[in-house]
Amino acid sequence: NAGVMQNPRHLVRRRGQEARLRCSPMKGHSHVYWYRQLPEEGLKFMVYLQKENIIDESGMPKERFSAEFPKEGPSILRIQQVVRGDSAAYFCASSPRRPARRNTQYFGPGTRLLVL
Amino acid sequence: SQQGEEDPQALSIQEGENATMNCSYKTSINNLQWYRQNSGRGLVHLILIRSNEREKHSGRLRVTLDTSKKSSSLLITASRAADTASYFCATGLTGTASKLTFGTGTRLQVTL
């Protein structure tokens, strides 16, 4: 049973370009979470999605950032017109169909975005 | 402000010693979890303790939770060099079945 998969693992973009980060949850998981980690800091929640629905986007910046989790295919975190401050590690996590009080989230290896 | 605060920020011990890390939080929680992150890697789930539990064990790990003090501790016994990593506590808040709120982490260095 493959774990959470993210690609690419490393992504370099120039200021103003778009970054697309992909996340495939664990088999049988339909809940996906995106977190951002700045250097030497903890993870900060960005968005929580279920298939075709955004459930909680309270951690998403108001502009340039968007996320989706289509019926088929991976979840996508899109950052438009990237700036140097977007440089960070972006982690995806997934949890089972019916999150209970356990709410264990399984994390992918992350995508490290570097904006030049 | 950050929901979870780990203490200490950094800890250096010798192999075989015990390592204790503490975490404090501010609001009511459903559960508290500890994760490990090796340098430049993803997070590995270590242990989850529910708000109605006080102590939990898993191998060399022992976690305690004191909801009256809004604090938790992670004890790693008989540490090994392979335990070198950053350790984060994360809280699942009451009323939200979704997001985890992470602390800033404790960087543990275990030397031979």
Image (tube, coloured by chain):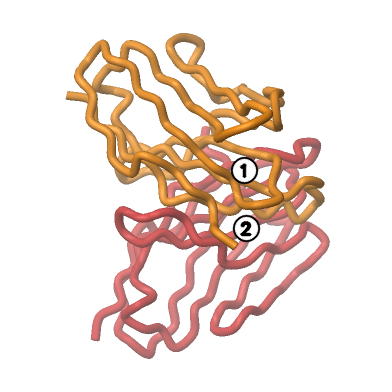
Q: Secondary structure at mark 1?
A: strand
Asked if residue B62 is positioned above or below residue B9 in the image, the reply reads: below
Question: From the image, which quarter does the C terminus of chain A lie in?
Answer: top left
Pick the residue in front: A110 or A43: A110
Tell me what residue is drawn at x 23 percent, y 24 percent. Answer: A13
| Residue A72 spot, x, y in % from top left | 64, 31
Residue A20 horizontal side relative to residue A104, left or right: left
Secondary element under disc 2, as helix, strand or loop, is strand
Colour representing chain B? red
Q: Which residue is mark 2?
A: B33
Q: Would you place residue B83 above or below residue B99 in this image? A: below
> Disc 1 residue type?
Leu
**Residue that appears at 59% across and 45% down:** A25
What colour is chain A? orange
Same-chain status of marks 2 and 1 = yes
Amino acid beneath label 2: Gln
> Which of B105 and A30 lies nearest the eye of the viewer?
A30
The crowd level at tag 1 (other Cα within 10 Å; few <14, some 14-19, many 20+) is: many
Q: Quadrant of residue B9?
A: bottom left
Is residue B22 left or right of A27 when viewed as pictured? left
Q: CA distance from mark 2 to mark 1?
A: 9 Å
Q: Is residue A80 left or right of residue A54?
A: left
Q: In what quadrant of the picture does the N terminus of chain A appear?
A: bottom right
